[in-house]
Amino acid sequence: MKHLTLFVLLLFVYGCADKNQAPSPETEKKSVEQVKTQPPSEAVKVEISAVEKKISPAQVKTDIDMMRPAEKIVIIRNNAETKFASALEAVAAAQTGDVIVLGSGLHRGPLAFKKSGITLKGEPGAYVTAYDAKWKPEWKKEPAYGKYAYSSPIPFDPQNMAIDGRVMINAEEQRHGLDVHEDGIGRNDRTPQQSIFTYISKEKRVLVSFSKEINPADHRIDACGKEPIIKIEGVDNCHVEQLILGGGIEGVQFKNTKGSSVKKCLIFGTDIAAHLSSGATECKVLENDITWNADALSSECDPSTGLVDNDVWNTHKQYGSYDKWGVFAGASGKDNEVAYNYVYDIWDGIEAAGGGDKEGIADYYRNKVFKGISQFNIGLKVHHNRVDLCLDDALEPGGELVNNQWYSNVISRAKCAIRIKTVAFGPFYVYDNLFFKCSDGMRFYKSTPESATVYVYHNIIEYPSAIIYHAMDQVAWNDPELKKLIKPGTPGFHVFNNIFLCEKPFSNSSGIKPNFKGDYNLYTSDKEPVFTEAGIDLHSIFNAKPEFIDMPNGNMLLKEGSQGKKAGTDLSKFSVKLPSCDGKYFKDGLPDIGLLALDKAKTPRGPVSGLWEIAEKNMNLGERDVTNYKLTPIRWVTGGKKIEYVVESLPEKGKEIALKLTTPHATKYKLTATSEDGKLIAERAGSGSKSIEKIRLKIPSEGWKRIFVKIEDSSEGQWRIEPQTEGLKVGINISAPLELNKFDGGRYIFEYDVPAGTQSFKASGDGCEIMRPDGKTEKPGNGGIVNTSGQPGTYKIMLNFIKRSPLTIEGPAKYAFFDSKQETVPLKKRWGRQGF
């Protein structure tokens, strides 16, 4: 395997924002102590160096209790202080030119700026939250939803909830969210999700559940409504600095504002930490620590030991509230900047989106895109950010990207390092970025018009496939009319002077041949004919072994004498003027392939706000250590359109036979249970809900030796059966080939009885091994043949795989029985925390 190893990083934070209610004049009069009356400044942009000295101690204490109600809330106006009883009242009373200073401890939001030119700053440990202070939960057990489920009345629809600071998964009622509380989503057990909540609208109750015995009354359970923690809307030049923001649907929301910013804050526990929304122009998101702080397990799990991140990802995508973001530029205005942030343990890192809606997307392309009329996210700069540990995409630029520059970012441990998604407008420039240790590398997503120009140059990408065409047979929203207007592929994309640490140069999910322009790249893999046929990479270097100056410490410039040194093409002579490639941007000869020698010292190696250590203990910040958790082995079977289980070792007459059957995607199936003499003893029909469905059978025993459970399922769905009565033995009909499914790292184990006189049988499947009755283990021979040498008894058939495997057993017995002790393995870390 030529997958070149890199090292990288620490970990960090994520955020929120909210709205404010202005106090009545009577309240303001009572709560505001006027120390000295001064007229508000006329200037919108204010000098705050004197205030900075006032609130920035030489050494930050880390033992601050963030949950203690704050005592200090003041407005500084012309060097005079006015005290207030709450941050809400201070923000409502602030005038242009004022600086609001919040002391350490808890401040209740949501807060909304009312005037332009206001700065809101925090002393170390100042924590602003939009969690509702009035809600006092009254928990009661809810066994119908699982043994660790509880509910409480709640007077509002909670958008986010947290347990002791860690965000719970929102499984929405209208998306069958109630189905996942007991057993998860039909893959592994409930361990990956940890805590889940669902708002039951008709009852005005919230249901919470956990993966183990937890009494919510013994923990801090918080909930917030629909407002951001801090809202900057309809005012200009407002600034949020040095605050800990957590617990809201958003951290800081910028809307119809110019010149506003959030800087040196720690933002956690929100769906969007910083939201550059419509009309946000010349706004800045700088030097913040951003983390989601999820209660669930992260992608830092070796997939060979368990697909826990996929379980969490699927819970959100199929049953929950979809994506979350560190920074989201959603149809924002011009010239915004996102830089020097530490984005850690999050869903999506940084995303830009904006353009046509699903309805009328073809008209949007006709009337806007093809006419070159762009209006969103123009001139956005995303640079020198450190993004580490993402459950989905670290960088996701898409839609309108006119004059966007995304550069000098360092990305690691993401489901996808960068997904360049359904670009409508360019030019878009991606350069000088380092992408490594991710589950997916550089993904070009869906076909784009030739006018959507993208320039990918001087980056380093580590992933088995250098460039990935994903869903390239589709267009935006896969609109059938738009498909007629856009040819498949990415003809406007240009890929030059990049290093790809890979095993193959190209992969494709849809069969569309590459049609981007590319050359003078370096690959550690072989060349593929598909590139040559397309005229791509005619001068590139393949099967290379690049040497870097100091990989362990993050200096990824090439050593003297390395392949790729002075082997690039001079992009200053390119047909388009490319940022950072003006004039002679290299010393002599030709440029190096790979990173530009830009100032990488500006990219964080860890937390940058100075607030992480304060919040770490109070809010349990940081990724879950997967090695502290264990999965229960769950075994699924897909048997074509028919599955037959046999149940033996039944209790004596009059006792109950209890069985639980589950399918993760219910159809209009038919389930019947019959006795050995053919008597129908139970019958069920599927709901067709396409969600998780459980069938609980309770059958009085009549002294049978065995019963049969048959399922007719035209969808060929997955099923599992769990005995609820102790001592039952369950097998499955193996007369026809089966597909097995599991999502943990343990082996799938069957017991197969071989009578005396049997010389051989056949068994095959992924990683198949056989344990003979005498305890010796062997692999089947050619064709799956197992020679018994006349040894009768119970043979164990063991298969080692993740996700799915075929199973074929041909021999004297009709049934193979599930070993009651299915194997599990300890969860292991996948990459580990990175070094820079």
Image (cartoon, helix red, strand yellow):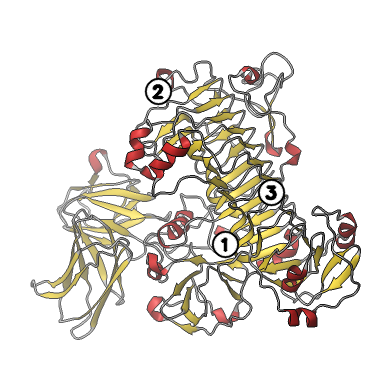
Residue 775, percent from left and from top: 34, 55
What amino acid is at disc 2?
Answer: Val
Residue positioned 38% across, 59% down in the render: 187
Residue 829 visible to the viewer:
no
Labelled pair 2, 1 in contact (Cβ < 8 Å): no
Q: Which residue is mark 2?
A: 530
The mark tally for this picture is 3
SS assignment at label 3: loop
Q: Residues within 10 Å of mark 1 (few under 14, many from 20)?
A: many
Q: Which residue is mark 3?
A: 283
Q: CA distance from mark 1 to mark 3?
A: 28 Å
- Tell which circle, 2 or 1, labels the residue nearer the N-terminal end: 1
What amino acid is at disc 3?
Answer: Cys
Q: Which residue is mark 1?
A: 294
1 vs 3, front mark: 3
The image quadrant of residue 620 is bottom right
- Residue 621's place in the image compared with 352, above or below, is below
Q: CA distance from mark 2 to mark 1?
A: 42 Å
Residue 338, percent from left and from top: 67, 46
- Residue 613's place in the image compared with 470, above or below, is below
Quadrant where the C terminus sits is top right
Residue positioned 74% across, 79% down in the render: 25
Q: In the image, is 749 to the left or to the right of 744?
A: left
Residue 641, percent from left and from top: 18, 55
SS assignment at label 2: helix
Residue 576 visible to the viewer:
yes
Q: Residues within 10 Å of mark 3 (few under 14, many from 20)?
A: many
The answer to which of 308 and 361 lies nearer the viewer is 361
3 vs 2, front mark: 3
